[in-house]
Amino acid sequence: MEEWDTYVIPTGNHYSLQNTFEEIRLDTLAFDLTFDSSAIYQSVNPNNQKDWNKVIGFSDCQSFHQSNSARLGWRWTPNVGIELGAYTYQNDNREFAEIDTIQIGDTVHSRIIKLDSTYAFDIGSKRYLATRGCSTDSVAYWLYPYFGGDEPAHDTVRIYLKFD
C-alpha cells in the first residue's frame, strides 16, 4: 500500500471505524506511523493518562487476542509527547514497555516481527524484544486502533498508517 490510511476513533468510542474481523498470516507487520493534534488528550481520571492505547497489531497462537497478541501501543504524556511501546499478551499475561517518544507530526517507521519465542518491536532505530506465547506459525487476525483502557476517546482521534 502506498497511500496513507486514516484510522478514525470517534468521540466516545474505543474502537476505530475501520475495525473488521480479518484473518491474516504474516511474520512481519511493517508500517510508517504519524499522529496529528487529535492525539493530544487529558484523561478525566488522572490515573488513566498512563493507560496504553493501541495503534495496530495482530492476535497470535490461534487464540483470542487477550490470550496471545502483539500490538504497538501509544499514549499522550503532557510535556513529553507520544510515547510508543510494545503491548503484548502471552498465555493470558499482559505486558507493556515504553520504547520511544515522538512528537505530533513526526513520522516513524515501525515493525512488529514474529520470531520463534519473541516479538521484535522496531520503532525507528530502537528495538525491543517481548516474550511470545508460542513458536509456531499460526492463523491470526488484525487488531486495529483502539483508545483506552477505562475511558473512551474524549474527542475524535486520527491515526495515520502507511503499510510496506
Image: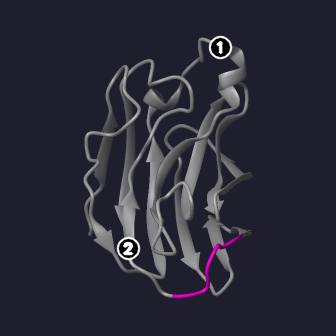
Tag 2 secondary structure:
loop
Percent across and percent down for residue 163 are 36, 67
- Up the image or down, 78 lies above or below 75; here it is above
First-in-chain label (2 vs 1): 1
Please name the residue shown 57% across and 79% down the image: 114
* Quadrant of the frame with the C terminus: bottom left
Percent across and percent down for residue 95 are 71, 54
Write down the quadrant of residue 110 in the picture: bottom right
Write down the quadrant of residue 111 in the picture: bottom right
Decide which of 3, 141 is in the foreground and name it: 141
Neighbor class of circle 1 (other Cα within 10 Å; few <14, some 14-19, many 20+) is few
Mark 2 → mark 1, Cα distance in angstroms = 37 Å
The residue that label 2 is drawn on is 164
Tag 1 secondary structure:
loop
Residue mark closest to the camera, 2 vs 1: 1
- Most extreme residue toward the top is 44
Percent across and percent down for residue 139 are 39, 78
Please name the residue shown 50% across and 71% down the image: 60
Neighbor class of circle 2 (other Cα within 10 Å; few <14, some 14-19, many 20+) is few
Which region of the structure is painted magenta? 131-136
**For residue 45, which numbered disc appears in the image?**
1
- The reply, left or right, for residue 82 in relation to residue 9 is right
- The reply, left or right, for residue 6 in relation to residue 106 is left
Q: How many marks can you see?
A: 2
